[in-house]
C-alpha cells in the first residue's frame, strides 16, 4: 500500500526520477580538431597545405607515393631521353661518340612543377681531353653553391681486374641552399629516380667534401676501385 503523502509528494502523473550520470575519464572522446595543414592531393578535403608531409604515413598510401603527391613534380620527356641515350651504349661512329653526354645537370622549372635539363650544364665526351682536362672536377664546378640539383654522371673507373663505365645519379643539396628548395628536391627525388631505372650508384652530396674522389670510389665499389677518371684513388 502506498501512503497518501508519498503519492501526493511525488505526483502520480510525474515521470520517475532518473539517476545522475557520472563522467568517466576518457569518455566521451574529444571532438576531432579541424585539420589546418593538409594536402588535397593526399586525400584531405579541408584545410590548407604548407608543402610538408604528414607526421605519419597515411593508411593505404605508400610513403614514396605520398612524397610524389606532396611535390606534384613531373619529369620532362627530354630528361628521360637523355638518360636513355647515356645508358644505352650503341655502336657509333667516332663523331657520334664525341657528342655523347658525359654529365648532365637537371633542375626544377621556374614554376617548380617539372624537372628539366638545365641549359648549358653538360659535358660531352668529345670535350674531355680537349677543352676539359678533369671532367669530374669540372662537373663539381657546375653545381650551384646555394641551390639544389639532380645530375647524371657517366663514371669511368678501374678495378683490380677491369675498366668500367657506369652511370651515377646525384642529388646535390648544399648547406647554403634554401630550406624550401631542399624539401622540394628531396620530396621529388623518387619521381626522377623512377624514370632512371637500372642505375646502380646513387650519391647525395651536401657539400664539396662529399664529392672528393675517395667518396666517389667508395660509392662505386670501395676498396676494389684503384682509379677514377684516370687518377689513382
Image (tube, rainbow, N blue to C red):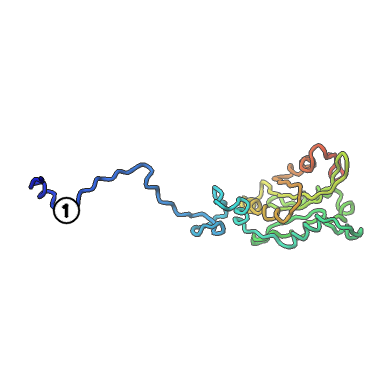
Q: Total marks drawn?
A: 1
For image coordinates 77% across by 57% down, the residue present is 83
Residue at (50, 59) in percent of width and height: 45
Query: In the image as oriented, which residue stretches furthest toward the right?
Result: 94
Q: Is residue 29 left or right of residue 20?
A: right
Image quarter of the N terminus: top left
Point out residue 107 in the picture as x, y percentages from the top left corner: 70, 57
Instruction: Please provide percent x and percent y for residue 82.
Output: 78, 59
Name the residue nearer the viewer: 105 or 22. 22
Q: Secondary structure at mark 1?
A: loop
- At which x and y percent is residue 52? 57, 52
Q: Nearer the viewer, residue 195 or 47?
A: 195
Residue shown at 68%/51% (left/top)?
146
Classify residue 115 by image quadrant. Answer: bottom right
Q: Is residue 90 left or right of residue 35?
A: right
Q: Nearer the viewer, residue 182 or 101?
A: 101
**Outermost residue toward the top in this view:** 223
Is 40 placed above or below 55 here? below
Q: Quarter of the image containing the C terminus?
A: top right
Residue topped by disc 1:
14
Image location of residue 215, percent across then percent down:
76, 41
Between residue 102 and residue 222, name the one nearer to us. Answer: 222
- Residue furthest to the front in view is 1
Q: Report crowding for label 1: few under 14, some 14 to 19, many 20 or more residues within 10 A (C-alpha).
A: few
Judged left or right of residue 213, residue 61 is left
Amino acid at each position: 500500500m502506498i501512503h497518501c503523502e508519498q503519492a501526493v509528494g511525488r505526483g502520480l502523473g510525474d515521470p520517475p526520477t532518473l539517476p545522475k550520470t557520472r563522467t568517466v575519464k576518457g569518455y566521451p572522446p574529444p571532438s576531432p580538431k579541424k585539420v589546418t595543414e593538409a594536402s588535397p592531393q593526399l586525400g584531405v578535403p579541408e584545410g590548407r597545405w604548407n608543402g610538408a608531409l604528414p607526421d605519419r604515413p597515411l593508411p593505404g598510401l605508400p610513403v614514396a607515393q605520398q612524397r610524389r603527391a606532396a611535390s606534384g613534380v613531373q619529369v620532362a620527356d627530354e630528361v628521360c631521353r637523355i638518360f636513355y641515350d647515356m645508358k644505352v651504349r650503341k655502336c657509333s661512329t667516332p663523331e657520334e661518340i664525341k657528342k655523347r653526354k658525359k654529365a648532365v645537370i637537371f633542375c626544377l622549372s621556374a614554376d617548380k612543377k617539372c624537372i628539366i635539363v638545365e641549359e648549358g650544364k653538360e659535358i660531352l665526351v668529345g670535350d674531355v681531353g680537349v677543352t676539359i682536362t678533369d671532367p669530374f672536377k669540372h662537373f663539381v664546378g657546375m653545381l650551384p653553391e646555394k641551390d639544389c640539383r639532380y645530375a647524371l654522371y657517366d663514371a669511368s673507373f678501374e678495378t683490380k681486374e677491369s675498366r668500367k663505365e657506369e652511370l651515377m645519379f646525384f642529388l646535390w643539396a648544399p648547406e647554403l641552399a634554401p630550406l624550401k628548395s631542399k624539401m622540394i628536391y628531396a620530396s621529388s627525388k623518387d619521381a626522377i629516380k623512377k624514370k632512371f631505372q637500372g642505375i646502380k650508384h646513387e650519391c647525395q652530396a651536401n657539400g664539396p667534401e662529399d664529392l672528393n674522389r675517395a667518396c666517389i670510389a667508395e660509392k662505386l665499389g670501395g676498396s676494389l676501385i684503384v682509379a677514377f677518371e684516370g687518377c689513382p684513388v
